[in-house]
Image (spheres, grey):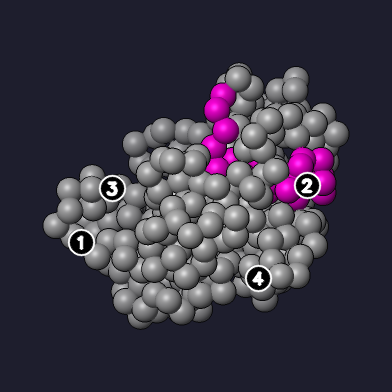
Amino acid sequence: MSTSELLIPLHVSYIQKLGENKDDLTYHLTSHLRLNAVYWGLTALAIMGRQDALDRNEMIEFVMSCWDEEAGGFGAHPGHDAHLLATLSGIQILVMQDAMERLDVDRVAKFILSLQQPSGVFAGDAYGEIDTRFLYCAVNALSLLGRLGDLDVKKTVGYIKSCRNFDGGFGASIGAESHAAQVFVCVAALAILGRLDEVDVDTLGWWLAERQLPNGGLNGRPEKLEDVCYSFWVLSALSILKKVPWIDAEKLTAFILSAQDPEGGGIADRPGDMVDVFHTIFGVAGLSILGYPGLVDLDPVYCMPAEVIEAKGLRKDWQALPRREK
C-alpha cells in the first residue's frame, strides 16, 4: 500500500487496537502515559473524522477511574498520583466527549492553581518538577474550565517572558536553550492569555522556519534529526504567528506520509521506525494545519478539534493553510 496518501482506515484500526492486550509488558511499561495516550488517540480520530471509533462511555469511565480524590486532579492511570499532564488530558477528553458534568471544576481548578510557584512557573505535581510545559497545561486547563480569571496572569506571563532567548525562541526554564516544543507551549499559553505582544514574531518565525531539513521534516532545535512530532510543535506555533507559509508544505506533507506503517497503521517519528500513538496524533495534527484534504480543522492553540473550541467561545486568532480538496 502506498504511503503517498494518509491511510485513515488503517490508522483508525491501529488506534482501536491500542491497549487491547493488557497482558503485554509494553502496556504496563507505558502506564505513566495512559491517560495522555487516550487523549492522543481520541484527538487523532476526531481530526480524521472518526471520533466515534472508540466507545464514548467506556472512555469517560476510564478517565474518571484516574481521578485522584485526595489531590483533586487526574493521574495517568488508576491509582497514580495526580499530575498536570494527566489532568489536562482528562479535561480535554471530557470536553471532547461532552461530559464535563462529571467533573468537580472547583476542586480541579484549586489543584491546578496550587501548583503555581512564586516565580510564576508551574510544577507538574506535588513533588515539584518545573517546566514551561506544565505552565501551558495549567493555562490550557483553566481556560477550558472557564477559570482563567483565577490565575495570576501577570506572574505567569512574566515567567514565560523570562524564558525568551535572543533567537526569539523559548526554553523549558530560565536560561534553557530554545526548543520547538517549548516554543509551542509558551506561544500557545501567551495566545490563550491574550499576550502575544511578548513574542518577537518575525525573529521567532524565522527560527521556526529554519527547523525544516532538506528531506522536508522538521527538527526541534539546530543540528538535530527530523521527527514527525515537530510537524505539530513547529506548525502550531507558526499558525499562531500566521507564518505557516514560511515552510515548504509539500515537502513536509510528503515526509509525514512517508513515516506511516502501510501494513499495520500508525505513524512513526521517521520512516522505517516503530509507530506509536504520540507520533500518530502529531503527524495527523500537522497534516490538518497543512490543509490536507478530508481532515477536520485542528485548533493549534489547544490541540483539539477547532469546532469544539469555537463552541466554547475560546478560539484565538490563528491561521492554518486552506483545506485542499481531494
Measure the alpha-carbon separation of dots 1 and 3.
13 Å
Q: Is residue 149 left or right of residue 6?
A: right
Which residue is painted at 69% across and 66% down in the image? 293
- Residue kind at label 1, given as amino acid type: Asn
Mark 1 or 3, closer to the camera: 1
- Residue kind at label 2, given as amino acid type: Val
Which mark is drawn over residue 294? Answer: 4
Callout 2: few (<14), some (14-19), or many (20+) C-alpha neighbours within 10 Å? many
Which mark is drawn over residue 30? Answer: 3
Task: Give the vertical position of 238 relative to 90 (above or below).
Answer: above
Measure the alpha-carbon separation of dots 3 and 4.
32 Å
Which residue is painted at 75% across and 70% down in the image? 325
Element at badge 1? loop
Measure the alpha-carbon separation of dots 1 and 4.
31 Å
Element at badge 2? helix
Residue ranking furthest to the left? 23
Q: Is 112 included in the stretch rendered in magenta? A: no
Mark with earlier residue (3, 4): 3
- Residue kind at label 4, given as amino acid type: Gly
On the image, numbered disc 2 is attached to which residue?
Answer: 244
On the image, numbered disc 1 is attached to which residue?
Answer: 21
Mark 4 or 2, closer to the camera: 4
Mark with earlier residue (1, 3): 1
Choose between 290 and 132: the one closer to the eye. 290
Measure the alpha-carbon separation of dots 1 and 2.
40 Å
**Region in magenta:** 224-250
Q: Residue 112 location in percent, x, y? A: 47, 52
Mark with earlier residue (2, 3): 3
